[in-house]
Image: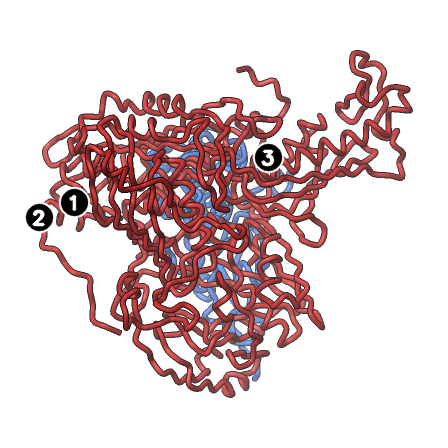
Chain colours: A red, B blue
Amino acid sequence: MENTYRYIGKATPRRDATEIVTGRTAYLDDLKLTNMIYGKVLRSPHPHALIKKIDKSKAERLKGVEAVLTWEDVPDWRGGTPRSTRVLDRKVRYVGDAVALVAATSEEIATEALHLINVEYEVLPAVFDMEEALKPGAPQLYDQFPGNVVTPGVPFFGPKSLQEVVMGDVEKGFAEADVITEGTFGYENMPNPLPPESPGVIALWEEPNKVTLWVSNQASYMDKITLFHVMERKVEVRTIGGPCGGSFGSKFMSWQVQCYAALLSRACGKPVKIVFSKEEHLAAFTLRPASRMSARVGMKKDGTVTAISGTWVIDTGYYSMTTQSQVAVGCGEVQIMVRCPNWNLKPVIVCTNRNASGIVRGFGGQELKCTLIPLLSLAMEKLDIDPLQFLKKNYVKPGDGYFWRDGIWYDYRGVDFTKTMEKGAEVFGWKEKWKGWLKPTWVDGTRRRGIGVGVHGNADIGEDASEAYVRLHPDGTAMLFSCITEHGTGQRTNFVKMVAEVLQIPINNISVTPSDSLVNPYEFGPAGSRGTYAIGSAIINAAEDAKKKLLEIIAPKLQADPSDLDTVDGFVFVKGEPGKRIPWRAMGVDRTCLGSGRFEPDYTLSNCMMTFVEVEVDTETGSVTLVRVVNATDAGTIIDPPGLEGQLNGCLGSAGIDSALFEEMILDRSTGHMLNANLIDYKWRTFSQLPVIDNVVLETRIDSHRFHAVGVGEIATSPGPSAVLMAASNAIGTWLHEYPVTPERVLKTLGKVTPKTRNGGVA
Amino acid sequence: MKRIRARKIRLTVNGKAYELEAGSQSDQVKPSHTLAHTLRETLGLKGTKVSCDEGACGACTVLMDGQPVFSCMLLTVECDGKSITTIEGLRDSATGKLDPIQQAFIDHTAFQCGFCTPGIIMSAKALLCENPSPTEEEVKEALSGNFCRCISHYQVVKAVMSASKEVR
């Protein structure tokens, strides 16, 4: 269909483009406030210990040190779901847990002071494996969580928040199956989304109970909400967001570093900046949750899934802030991927003595699918079902439904994505390349290629609430009030395009407020691909409301009914008589015209991403190379073509496809230390290792907002990892079931090296 | 502490000459200060970004006598007499015109979060100075020390290739 929009769907330069390419974009660490000092964190060398004594007197005497805080000095601020984890505690629960905070006039002095703090620990036994942690007699991390099982449920999602997928009658389902497969599958490598900009904050405390924080977060308004609760609902919190050097979900939850700076600022009355080192970012900030699932599936010859039953164990590390939310959304997403009438899938979230898991692109569903698809593949192999046909058949269709995160059943009213999947398959050449399960598509000596496919979709494109204002000015300009930061997706520019399209004024005539919680209304922030539909709707509504009010103000001056008027380029005109027009200025030069908009959550739409991959395995060296990727999606309407392309190319990094190839944090399971907490030992893809990527984007008008668009960015990472496992298995003709498919694992599976066990002693 | 005979470090940064004092006072360049630290904190040139601070990610890339270097891996006291170009020095200071590479990055939306962009642009600049007509493979190789997590790589390669045509 021809694009008749003035801005939507047209490539427009990002509004921050010149700032970015000239180095003038001020990220958090580029800010310097008057009298600002620097904070550092003393971290535990033990995975589990009680602090018996801390002597901070030497550190306090060091010239330039302004505050040293330990658990004895701080209020009982707690994070976690339910609130369990003190900002500083007498007990440390992982190597890297915060023991003391120092503020000093320079980073060097603060670091020096850390060395002068004397801590006496009583070391406790630690546990690093999720199933070990569940056994009777295992070391207990919290009195509050007996057996190390974190309390399920998410209060924010409502009283019925989704904790499992249970429906129908699984026994009946298994009885109807032609094939039943079972087994234990993991996605346990805990990659880090790893934005280049490390987590950080600047906090300024003002007496008696007010704190302002300059944050780096994709969702800066939510920091205000999170901190309000963490700080016992006694502190007035203001957050100011700015350009964010990548987040991929992770910085959404930065309450700890923010509390450290707030406490230090409270102690010395000056603004305090803390920016984590890359080592802290990797070893003391959040990772992807680790998953292990023991399950059974029943399948009919035609690919109908008759029953899924099992236990999904999720290792959340030393505490959980959002893992229950990820489980809830993951449980919803799995129903979007597999239509099945009989379920008994029970998640268990476990605490272990490593750094915490948190938010990452893919939010629960990536984890669950990476363990479930290999199991479904075993059944498909037995029945000789092409995985593309299986995924196509079983993906949610109009008239189907699912229990979403709030435990409520929603009837899906979106589009049928079959066409998207078929178009992707055609571009990839699936039909020609698919030779059957465990069969390579191409062999040349020791080099063998295989293909795989995965799919993901998320009804969180309509999650949570958003609010916005649009203010019109007599000079023909407008201002958008929305608490959105730019974290790489280009959405700050895209929202301006939406306003420009509604108001029909040039993009450059619209400014956007800074993402300051003091001036903007509620905004959940871009997460779960909700930016385009949820935030976009609030903003469109605000622009439409402003326009409506403008036309009402101007109507008497044109002696017309408001419904007969429209506006373009700062003029209001009578429809059908474009000559009869007056400028916005006619509203009066001493006024503005304010519209407001709100979006209410809507879980009846989902997006879809299907990813096809081809890998090449060298059976001599065990190396697996990603050769080609095709992503297929339907965005409804493309808002910004190059921005969308970037989002889809993002499928590789940020704990995405590469988590199946080489990305992982290596935990020393005898000491609890992360062994690769630096950017040399943590493997990441370089420019010289780029596979060919083709992105196939359909535009089927989706019934979302006036531009019929839905977001797809967040899900780009999710279908790929299981597809890589499938492709590598097909290439070598044997199942590979562990992520990532390192050369060692490939050679082990091929029987070319002796298995090495990674089990160390006990701590 | 007496401040006699303080060693001077002479740097030319983006064409401007600086004379900094080496020493341990707060206004001096300490022996432990990296070039990245001095550029950012002493000279206020915040365009150079620090990500890993251990020579692995390339975010802090600047040109030293025309060669790309990781400014987090050099001590400022070792840079006496050197000429440094940072991202702030690419734009024509007289006309305000962007370097063709900068313009190409805008035209190709060759960034997402933008944090790694200054480092990538400086690596690309060094490449095009040395080899104005690189192949795609040469561009990828030249940028292989630059970490980008949003995966802007594909658009970056296109931008650098188009800038190379511009430069020629």
Res A235 quadrant in image: bottom right
x then y, percent, for residue B62: 47, 51
Question: Disc 2: which chain?
Answer: A
Q: Is residue A460 left or right of residue A33?
A: left
Do circles 3 and 1 both sit on a common chain? yes
x then y, percent, for residue A384: 18, 28
x then y, percent, for residue A17: 57, 39
Q: Is residue A407 left or right of residue A335?
A: right
Vertical arrangement, residue A211 with respect to residue B162, above or below: below
Label pair 1/2, CB-CB below 8 angstroms: yes
Residue nearer the viewer, A726 or A602:
A602
Q: Which mark is residue A752?
A: 2
| SS class, disc 3 | helix
Question: Disc 3: which chain?
Answer: A
Q: Earlier in the sequence, mark 2 or mark 3?
A: 3
Vertical arrangement, residue A186 with respect to residue A706, above or below: below
